[in-house]
């Protein structure tokens, strides 16, 4: 039998996980001998062959933990998946990886910052990993793809690598397949249940050399992923937010406890002249425009609030807002304006 078939026969057998898989191969000396020891019936063997045929028909590849292409950081994690399936470009697995996670209910400002960070990492030849959920995950994948760099993002799925969820992200799924890779430890065609998402979070944390946490509730899956990363010794960064917003409780708590580094943006990770350029632009503006931009931060501020802060009418500040927006210093989002 083929080496891959033997490995799949072992790991797909009921009651066998990563620990028993490794123990069987160690005890019997090879995947073939370990698989034969299980005495799998013909129906189970046929089910594994059908999965392999389905994977081939969908151009899905299998990568074992003894393959050079297997993600090195993931290989170091205890009880890592012995085999992962990959749809897309397996060369993506070779690149240094950072993971970005956060709430599905992210603010526009939060998603904008995440996308900018993801894009910058991709431009510096990192691959950005996330879970393809709506909200923060989507912003991370989109930001990486926006870099126009090949093999820029990885989606780690809880179901089979061909199971697209959520359906709203079907277009994004195919973009990731084209510009990176979708990976999973589950059988091709597998429909996930709740526990599979927790396991998926383990691998999002384990595959990365850095994990960046965006907006997240205290008891969210994203916080669980950050906890896994801390346990694995991954370098964790958290983006702070307004303390009255429940979505700030997760990252703010990790920053307060010292378990995560404070993330203020891309300048925390890369030397860039963008800050100098923006400072230069601001210094050349009128005193009125400078006072206006000083009132705008990462939380959307409406025009009516801005008029009160700078003591002007809406008609008076509209032209200044247009100038600042054209110069790329602010962006209009739901709820008002945010600083870029």
Image (tube, grey):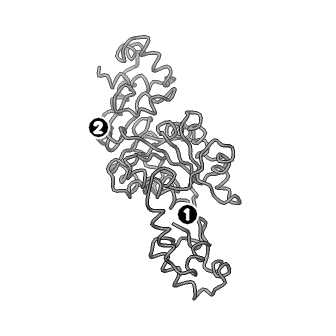
Depicted 108 relative to depicted 216: above or below: below
Counting from the top left corner in percent of width and height, residue 148 is at: 33, 56
Residue at horizontal 63%, vertical 50%? 251
User: Relative to 194, is 161 on the left or the right?
Assistant: left
Q: Secondary structure at mark 2?
A: helix
Front position in the image: 278 or 66: 278
First of labels 2, 1 by sequence position: 2
Number of labels in the image equals: 2
**Which residue is label 1 attached to?**
109
Front position in the image: 161 or 23: 23
User: Foreground mark, 2 or 1?
Assistant: 1
Residue at horizontal 37%, vertical 44%? 181
User: Relative to 333, is 7 on the left or the right?
Assistant: left
Q: Secondary structure at mark 1?
A: helix
Depicted 273 relative to depicted 128: above or below: below
Mark identifier at residue 321: none
Toward which corner of the image does residue 307 lie, by quadrant?
A: bottom right
Near mark 2 (Cα within 10 A), the count class, few <14, some 14-19 or many ≥20, is: few
Counting from the top left corner in percent of width and height, residue 256 is at: 69, 47
Toward which corner of the image does residue 310 lie, by quadrant?
A: bottom right
**Which residue is label 2 attached to?**
56
Depicted 51 relative to depicted 163: above or below: above
Counting from the top left corner in percent of width and height, residue 245 is at: 68, 59
Q: Residue 54: tell me if it is visible.
A: no
Residue at horizontal 60%, vertical 86%? 314
Q: Residue 90: tell me if it is visible.
A: yes
Front position in the image: 21 or 46: 21
Counting from the top left corner in percent of width and height, residue 160 is at: 43, 40
Front position in the image: 89 or 118: 118
């Amino acid at each position: 039998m083929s080496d891959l078939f033997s490995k799949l026969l072992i790991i797909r057998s009921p009651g066998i996980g990563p620990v028993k898989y490794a123990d069987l191969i160690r005890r019997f000396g090879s995947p073939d001998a370990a698989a034969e020891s299980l005495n799998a019936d013909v129906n189970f063997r046929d089910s594994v062959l059908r999965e392999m045929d389905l994977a081939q028909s969908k151009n899905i590849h299998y990568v074992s933990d003894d393959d050079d292409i297997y993600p090195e950081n993931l290989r170091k994690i205890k009880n890592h998946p012995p085999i992962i399936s990959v749809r897309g470009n397996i060369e993506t697995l070779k690149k240094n990886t950072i993971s970005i996670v956060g709430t599905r209910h992210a603010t526009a400002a939060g998603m904008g910052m995440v996308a900018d960070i993801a894009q910058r990492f991709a431009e510096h030849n990192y691959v950005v990993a996330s879970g393809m959920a709506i909200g923060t995950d989507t912003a991370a994948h989109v930001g990486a793809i926006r870099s126009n760099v090949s093999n820029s993002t990885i989606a780690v799925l809880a179901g089979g690598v061909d199971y697209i969820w959520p359906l709203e992200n079907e277009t994004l799924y195919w973009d990731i397949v084209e510009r990176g890779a979708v990976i999973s430890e589950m059988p091709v065609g597998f429909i996930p249940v709740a526990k599979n998402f927790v396991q998926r979070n383990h691998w999002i944390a384990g595959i990365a050399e850095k994990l960046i946490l965006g907006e997240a509730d205290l008891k969210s899956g994203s916080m669980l992923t950050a906890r896994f990363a801390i346990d694995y010794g991954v370098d964790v960064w958290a983006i702070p937010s307004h303390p009255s917003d429940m979505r700030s409780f997760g990252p703010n708590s990790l920053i307060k406890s010292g378990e995560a580094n404070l993330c203020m943006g891309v300048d925390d990770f890369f030397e860039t002249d963008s800050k100098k350029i923006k400072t230069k632009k601001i210094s050349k503006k009128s005193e009125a425009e400078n006072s206006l931009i000083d009132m705008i931060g990462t939380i959307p501020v409406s025009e009516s609030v801005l008029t009160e802060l700078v003591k002007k009418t809406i008609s008076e500040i509209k032209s200044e807002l247009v100038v600042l927006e054209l110069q790329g210093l602010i962006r209009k989002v739901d709820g008002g304006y945010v600083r870029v």
